Amino acid sequence: MRKHEGERKQIKTPERIVRERGRKANYAIIIIVLLIGIGFMGFRLYKHHLVSKILPEVTIEAGSPIDVTLFTQGNISNGVFVTDISGIDTTVPASYGLKVSAGDRIKVMRDVVLNIVDTTAPAAEAVPQTIYTDGLPAPEDTVTNIYDLSACTVSYAQQMPEILEGGSYDVPVKITDAYGNETIINVPFTVIDDHTAPLIYGAHDFEAFIGDAIAYMDGITVTDDYDENPVLEVDTSGVNVTEEGYYPVTYTATDEQGNSTSVTVTIHMRIKPERYYEPEELYELARQIIEDNDICDDSMSQMEQAFRITAWVSTHIHYMMDSNKCDWTAGAYDALTTMYGDCFNYMAMCRAMYGAMGIESITVERYPINISSHYWNLINIDGLWYHCDACVFLSMTDITFIFMYTDAELDPSNNSYDPATLPDGVIVATESVQDMLDYETLTVTGENE
């Protein structure tokens, strides 16, 4: 078959073949370059994507641990610190520049910033306070168990008055750390308005012997309504320990608020007699006689106890014209052990028995001596002194004993005395109590205890 006339056989020349091959090669190169460029751009985009998974800045609270996961997010893994973080103290607020690396087959690294901040307020506990109205304690003393990572200061949260009225208060105390974080603790305050002076017990007139040690504080106690340990001082500057006589001794008790009270007693300095017995030894003998004879007991008032003692001694001592009068303790010992004696022994035995029941008494001697010497007691009942005489001369009166007489009620022919010889502070009562006494039953009526 013949070919159409319009058709001509194309014959490719070598030059044409080269040109066509060149064009194809160029296309391939372009495609390769394009593919390489696309791959490189994709790689860069992927690395950028990985880098974006690492946070550029992280802030943590002081004291928190540092972990690389704080900087990584999403599905990126194998994060590590390139920077050595072993020297970072997380308890101190600061900022640190670090490097973090992450990724699996493709690793990326990023410069990051770690900020350590302290925004946590301190913790503390209140210490309840009991104070007086003259001032506040240091604020540091009102809280305890303070906890914070930095140093703290303690202050009162508001301006406090120097003196508070008595009562109960909640006082706000502020704890502030080095970075300005604050905590307010309400501290319970009990404020005491104390104007009451301490009380002194056991102070009474006493005697001591020249050359002996003097127990000024023996039996003295002090109490206060708030102060557990008030200060007790004794002033002995007026005592001449080398010369017989009566001298003042003053006890002063002061509490921590400065409230003060004083009591002055008299010490009788004497030359020690040849025969002398310790009063406590005599009191023990007297207590035994009181108990054995059911004379009185602790359920009675001191007035009734002294009433029964005076009456019992009056009827149970056998009168004897002579006695050893070197000291009242010798006279008491003789009477307590023999039940014999004269007026001196009556007085001394009463004095021992009064003392056994805690009743203060002193000796009174007749003055002037009209017939013979005579002795009796003054006793202190509720702060008032009265005459008691268990040995009355029957030829001069129709009564067998005198109990709690005033000076005006005494018979001067039998019981005259010189008030100037009494110790300082001993003043005989002037109000009669005889209408309170029943001499048949030895009881007291209408007594105010």
Image (spheres, rainbow, N blue to C red):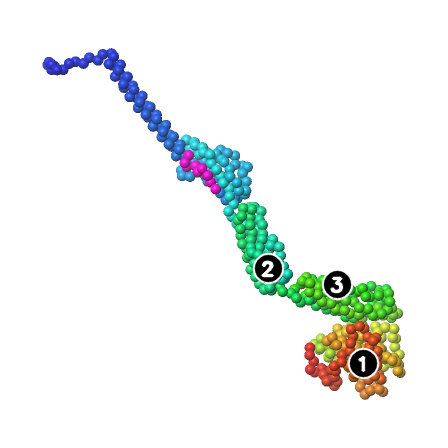
Return the x and y of residue 305 as percentages of the image width and height.
74, 78
Q: Residues within 10 Å of mark 3 (few under 14, many from 20)?
A: few
Return the x and y of residue 264 as percentages of the image width and height.
76, 69
For this view, does 443 lie left or right of residue 169? right
For this view, does 195 lie left or right of residue 110? right
- Looking at the picture, which amino acid does disc 2 mark? Pro
The mark closer to the camera, 1 or 2, is 2
Task: Tell me the distance, in whole angstroms, between the alpha carbons under discs 1 and 3.
Answer: 37 Å
- Looking at the picture, which amino acid does disc 3 mark? Glu
Badge 1 element: strand
Badge 2 element: loop
Q: Mark 2 points at which residue?
A: 161
- Looking at the picture, which amino acid does disc 1 mark? Asp
Badge 3 element: strand
Residue pictured at 78% horizontal, 73% vertical? 425
Q: Residues within 10 Å of mark 2 (few under 14, many from 20)?
A: few
User: Magenta part of the protein: which range?
Assistant: 51-59
Q: Which mark is residue 337?
A: none
For this view, does 20 lie left or right of residue 106? left
Return the x and y of residue 15 as percentages of the image width and height.
25, 12
Q: Does the magenta stretch include residue 56?
A: yes
Residue 260, image quadrant: bottom right
Q: Which of marks 1 and 2 is nearer the N terminus?
A: 2
Q: Earlier in the sequence, mark 1 or mark 3?
A: 3
Q: Mark 1 points at which residue?
A: 389
Q: Mark 3 points at which residue?
A: 233
Q: Is 305 drawn above or below residue 398 in the view shown?
A: above
Q: Earlier in the sequence, mark 2 or mark 3?
A: 2
Q: Is 171 drawn above or below residue 202 in the view shown?
A: above
Task: Tell me the distance, in whole angstroms, between the alpha carbons under discs 2 and 3.
Answer: 33 Å
